[in-house]
Image: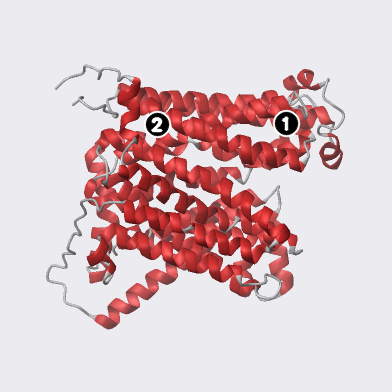
Amino acid sequence: MTDTPPAKKTLWQAVRPFFQRKVLAMICLGFSCGLTLTLIFDTLSVWLRTVGLSLEVIAFFSLATFAYSLKFVWAPLVDRVPLPILTRLLGHRRGWMLLTQSLVMLGLWLISGLNPQENLALMAAIAVMLGFVGATQDIVVDAWRIESADQDGQGVMATAYAWGARVAPFIAGIVPLILAETLGWGFAYALMAALMGLGLIGTLLAKEGVHTIRVIQYGDLPPHPVTEGLEWGGRILLMVIAASLMGAGLTGNINLFQFTFPSPEAFDAVKSVWTSKQTGIFVQLPAVSVGLGLMFLACVPMPNVPTRPGAYLRQTFVEPIVDFFKRYENLAVLILATICVYRLADFLLNINGAFYVDLGFDLAVIGEVRKIFGVVMTIIGVTAGGLSMTRFGMKFSLITGAVICAGSNLAYAWLATQGDSIPAFSLTLAIDNISGGFAGTVLIAYMSSMISEGFAAPQYALLSSLYALPGKLLASQSGRIVESAAKGADQGGLAAPFLPWLHNLPAVSFTKPAETLGVSREALGAGYMLFFTYTAVIGFVAVVLAVWLIRVGAIKEKGEA
């Protein structure tokens, strides 16, 4: 046993691991995952808006991405169920990759042939199907990534994944918009379906890792097909209700429950409370909490009632969780808390698009800086994160990522004082994207290093859902925080100390939105500054937790026992 830190690697020693076949495969697979997620909502929402659909209808399509938050539910099935022919020919992981990528290609091709004004319901159904298939692709790609490298190599594979996953939204967010102007949206989506071929190349390049399917032990429980079918049916129904509640809470949209109301008037009354900025949080958060509770109940065995479905769920869903807590014992809660908080500050920046508009930037400028310059800066951050892990180790990289990620939010507070300055905008975006790329890559590698080889798919799916859900919950309240702070700024509220920094703003900055809100433009700017300061403070909580993890020995470098 030794506490001696590993020697710092030379630059070539840090770079050399990136020149491997599996790294190229990982880039292609990451691209495939990122392309799917972007096309089923972000780009699709632009298409829907250009044909005149309402924002309410478009927001409903965000449910297509909700499957990514719940992928831990069916990850055990993906981990365990072999596919006829494909598993024998390609192996367990690669067989699932090929299936999901083929289905994504098919779904995108089907969407390319639809007119949203005439086939909206069918398009929505295909988008939801793509969300489920895309989340399944994520499950199996993450599992293959973890199984294809030892703990010391997780940083390299996480970096390669991030390279592909970060470039894909750039391609899927720009190319279809350009092509749609001349060749139409159908051609654009058909081309995106063809680009999924890069994922197939990644699957063929990948080598199947070691994966052993554990046999379910039913003991002396005899099969009862009828009662087992009823139990599975009840559990699936409970999952659907739970997912609907969580989706309604996270999106602020309760249209899925419209059929349960006795009259349109009753539905409209509840909807007004549900979507109100003043009252929405008090019903949306409980809805998500109840949904999570129901989802948990649907996935665990019934107490004191042994059944074959219960035995299956115990060994596929409960045992991976128990394994994690057994391995890390008292440190498990601290590790999970760190994962939850590490990127929370970035999730809260979901109002940045509105912030740029309020500052007075043209949409063309926002698009060019975010889509082109921003992607380049993100790739730089991802690369820096990967090199940091391979050269300096996980401890240094985890703390560095937490510090720069939290500090980058203060750059947005500074941007609020600069108005529509393109140099200031570019600098802020560079700081944010570099830090986000760095921290995101490090977090992926850290979570991957926590996983047991026998439970790669379910454990990583659970951790990735865990770190995303709190951010999505709190992000829905970002706008309310800014507006409340702005309304109190002129009366000496918490945002008032920021007012002196905003007296020299350009005339275009915050003027129109401040008039709509009924506050001075300096007050609205102060509201934004206070909000970004809040997010930075939350980010520094992650710094404290990361330092704590290192102090108690929860992070081990190669060569440490």
Residue 452: which quarter of the image? Answer: top left
Q: Quadrant of the N terminus?
A: top left
- Residue 538 x/y as whole percent: 53, 30
Given the current orientation, which residue lies at the most extreme left position?
A: 220
Find the distance from the CA under tag 2 to the CA under tag 1.
36 Å
Mark 2 packing: few (<14 Cα in 10 Å), some, or many (20+)?
many
455 vs 233: above or below: above
Q: Tell me if residue 502 can be seen.
A: yes
In the picture of the structure, the residue carrying the numbered disc 1 is 527
- Secondary element under disc 2, as helix, strand or loop, is helix
Colour mapping: secondary structure
Residue drawn at point x = 78 percent, y = 30 percent: 420
207 vs 230: above or below: above
- Residue 537 x/y as whole percent: 55, 26
In the picture of the structure, the residue carrying the numbered disc 2 is 386
Residue 533: which quarter of the image? Answer: top right
Q: Tell me if residue 54 can be seen.
A: no
- Residue 275 x/y as whole percent: 68, 55
- Residue 244 x/y as whole percent: 53, 63
Residue 159: which quarter of the image? Answer: top left
Circle nearer the N terminus (2, 1): 2
